[in-house]
Image: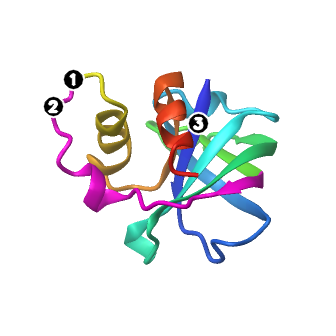
């Protein structure tokens, strides 16, 4: 399984990225060292969407807080950049893909990243990973 993360990215051209205590959804909590991950710079923090593909160098689950009843699993990850995006792919390009059952990679990304605007790590289908490769 491949993964994607939407988060605040301070330096889109950095060779490595570190993200602490990121929310996970749609299988994102299963991310592990060696996995492929696509990095989206969150538009909520001034980013432009897809910026890179990388390899997870480390992944560490964050312990749940005992004082909270419901919690989204969180993970800290370090990523080594392997490729930069050469074409734009973000909220503006994906927002028209709203037929949640059409099976399109664009729809999967819109659903997982932009239906709820929070930053997160998500698992993505192999077809979606192949689609994203076309933007690098």
Disc 3 secondary structure class: strand
Q: Say whether disc 3 or disc 2 marks the residue closer to the N-terminus.
A: 3
What residue does disc 3 label? 3
Which quadrant is home to the N terminus? top right
Q: Position of residue 43 (x, y in %)?
A: 39, 69
Disc 1 + disc 3, Cβ < 8 Å: no
Q: Say whether disc 1 or disc 3 marks the residue closer to the N-terminus.
A: 3
Disc 1 secondary structure class: loop
Which residue is at a point 26% across and 46% down the rendered structure image?
A: 115
Q: Is residue 25 left or right of residue 59?
A: left
Disc 2 secondary structure class: loop
Q: Residue 73: give its label.
A: none
What residue does disc 1 label? 102
Q: Residue 99: give its label.
A: 2
Query: Which range of residues does the magenta coloring cover?
Result: 79-101
Q: Residues within 10 Å of mark 1 (few under 14, many from 20)?
A: few
Q: Is residue 55 left or right of residue 49?
A: right
Q: Is residue 28 left or right of residue 111?
A: right
Q: Position of residue 46 (x, y in %)?
A: 43, 78
Disc 1 + disc 2, Cβ < 8 Å: yes
Which residue is at a point 47% across and 60% down the rendered structure image?
A: 87
Q: What color scheme is it?
A: rainbow
């Amino acid at each position: 399984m491949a993964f994607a993360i939407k988060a605040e990215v301070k330096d889109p051209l950095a060779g490595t990225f570190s993200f602490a205590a990121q929310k996970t959804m749609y299988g994102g909590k299963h991310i592990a060292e060696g996995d492929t991950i696509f990095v989206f710079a969150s538009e909520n923090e001034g980013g432009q969407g897809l910026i890179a593909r990388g390899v997870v160098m480390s992944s560490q689950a964050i312990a749940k807080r005992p004082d909270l009843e419901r919690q989204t699993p969180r993970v800290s990850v370090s990523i080594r950049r392997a490729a930069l995006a050469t074409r734009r792919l973000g909220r503006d390009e994906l927002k028209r893909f709203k037929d949640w059952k059409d099976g399109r990679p664009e729809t999967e990304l819109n659903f997982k990243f932009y239906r709820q605007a929070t930053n997160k790590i998500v698992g993505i289908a192999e077809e979606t990973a192949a689609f994203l490769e076309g933007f690098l």
